[in-house]
Image (cartoon, rainbow, N blue to C red):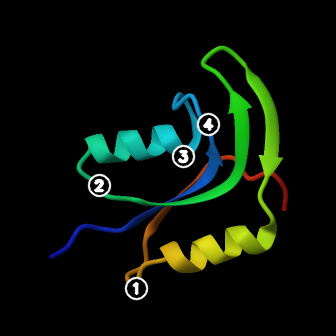
Amino acid sequence: MGAIPVVVIGGWDPSGGAGVARDLLTLQKLGVRPSAVITAITSQDARARGRVFPLDPSTVTAQIEAAWPRTPPVVKVGMVYSR
C-alpha cells in the first residue's frame, strides 16, 4: 500500500518561515512527499511581509492539474490571494 498523496496549495515565502515552503519542510520531516501549488509569491524576510504578487488564476489551475495525483489526495490550503 502506497503513501497517501498530499497537495499543498498556498503562497511562497522566500524566507522559508511560512507558506508552502514551511509546509513542504514539515511534511518531508514527517516522511511525506507532497506536491505543491503556488497561488502567490511574497517578498519578505523573517521579520515582516513586504509585497504580495498573486499568480494568474490560469497558472494556479494549470499547477493544480499537473500536481493532482490519480488517487484522491489530502489537500492543505494556505494563502489564497483571491477567489
Q: Which residue is mark 2?
A: 32
The N terminus - image quarter? bottom left
Residue lying at 60% horizontally and 18% vertically, measured from the top left: 46
Q: Amino acid at mark 1?
A: Arg
Q: Is residue 51 above or below residue 80?
A: above
Q: What's the CA distance linking mark 2 and mark 3?
A: 14 Å
Q: Amino acid at mark 4?
A: Asp
Q: Amino acid at mark 2?
A: Val
Q: Secondary structure at mark 2?
A: loop
Q: Are marks 4 and 3 in contact (CB under 8 Å)?
A: yes
Q: Which residue is mark 3?
A: 20
Indicate which disc, 2 or 3, sits on the residue closer to the N terminus.
Answer: 3
Residue lying at 84% horizontally and 62% vertically, measured from the top left: 83
Q: Are marks 3 and 1 in contact (CB under 8 Å)?
A: no
Q: Secondary structure at mark 1?
A: loop
Q: What's the CA distance linking mark 2 and mark 4?
A: 20 Å
Please name which of the two marks, 3 or 1, marks the residue nearer to the observer: 3
Q: Secondary structure at mark 3?
A: helix
Which label is found at residue 13? 4
Indicate which disc, 4 or 1, sits on the residue closer to the N terminus.
Answer: 4
Which label is found at residue 70? 1
Q: What's the CA distance linking mark 4 and mark 3?
A: 7 Å
Q: Secondary structure at mark 4?
A: loop
Indicate which disc, 4 or 3, sits on the residue closer to the N terminus.
Answer: 4
